[in-house]
Amino acid sequence: MKNFKIIAILLIVIFVSLEVFVLDSSPKIENEKPIVTVSTFALYDVTKYIAGESVFVKNILPFGTDPHSFELTPKIMAGIEKSTLVFYSGAGLEPWIEKIHFKAKTVDMSQYVSLRKIEEDDEHHHEHHASHGGLDPHYWLDFENMQKIATKITEELILLSPENEKQYVEKKDRYFSMLKELDNQYKRVLLSCKVKNVILNHNSIGYLAGKYNFHSESLSGLSPEAVPSPNDIKRILLEIEKDGVDTIFYENFVNAKVIDSIAKDAEVKVDVLQTLGNITADQAAKSVTYKELMQENLLKLSKAMQCN
């Protein structure tokens, strides 16, 4: 009888140990996937779409953080160190990237796209101009550049997981189709517009303006953090009056106090344009996509530009 009790106790101990082992092991299934880290929402969207569930896609920027003013923390750096592959935007957008010593393979995506040069009359704050090397880093707002990004990401994912090549290529082709559809929508909607000048706080839509034949005028040049001078404010007020502008824009994560003041003085409306460097926590919770945000931008631009 005593031996039977001992055996029963041993069986219970073994059963409990096995159950604890299974519980401890189950969360590691996700961690066994390669971790691909990205630095902007645009890169997050295309990587997540093409990779599907084959990798774990991690965004360096916490959702709701301005990419221009982002500061690294030890916790974020520790997470990046576990990456297998890193895609970052480049073109001077992430000055903090130089502080990271990557163990993983890193890809500067700006090396694979067509970059827009900033002309002297495009940039009113020349001290920030220099930090970008004379290049506009918001290249993901060009749908052709997004195709180039999708191609490079697909190539790198195939090298990482060659067994998923067919899936990656098919997803990339579908992403291409979506981008071409967006391009056609922009061409069609912005073909005939009464107002050809879009005014915003930060010079972030130069690629769209150049592609679809309108002008963008900014309060603070390439830097959303630059403090506008009285001459900048006067210049914007004159542009509003001259071109019949009835809506001016700012982007997420910036202080809209000056833009709101200008709008009040000029008696025009204020709205938000999505520049897709990052998204808000609320948008992330709703799983918004690049396509949805670019369609939202098109609707707002078409109203502001009074398109037929």
Image (cartoon, helix red, strand yellow):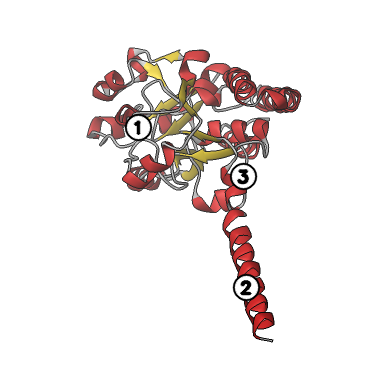
| Labels 2, 3: front one | 2
2 sits left or right of 214 in the view: right
213 sits left or right of 206 in the view: right
Q: Quadrant of residue 76?
A: top left
One can see residue 281 in this view: yes
Q: Residue 72, position in %: x, y?
A: 33, 40
85 sits left or right of 155 in the view: left
Q: Residue 146, position in %: x, y?
A: 59, 23
Dividing the image into 4 quarters, which one contains the C terminus? top right
Q: Nearer the N terminus, badge 2 or badge 1?
A: 2
Q: Amino acid at mark 1?
A: Leu
Residue found at x 49% / y 20%: 109
Q: Secondary structure at mark 2?
A: helix
| Labels 3, 1: front one | 3
Q: Nearer the viewer, residue 50 or 127?
A: 50
Q: Is residue 173 positioned above or below 100 on the image? A: above
Residue occupied by mark 3: 288
Residue found at x 23% / y 33%: 229
Residue occupied by mark 1: 219
Local packing at callout 3 (Cα closer than 10 Å; few below 14, some 14-19, many 20+) is some
Residue occupied by mark 2: 10
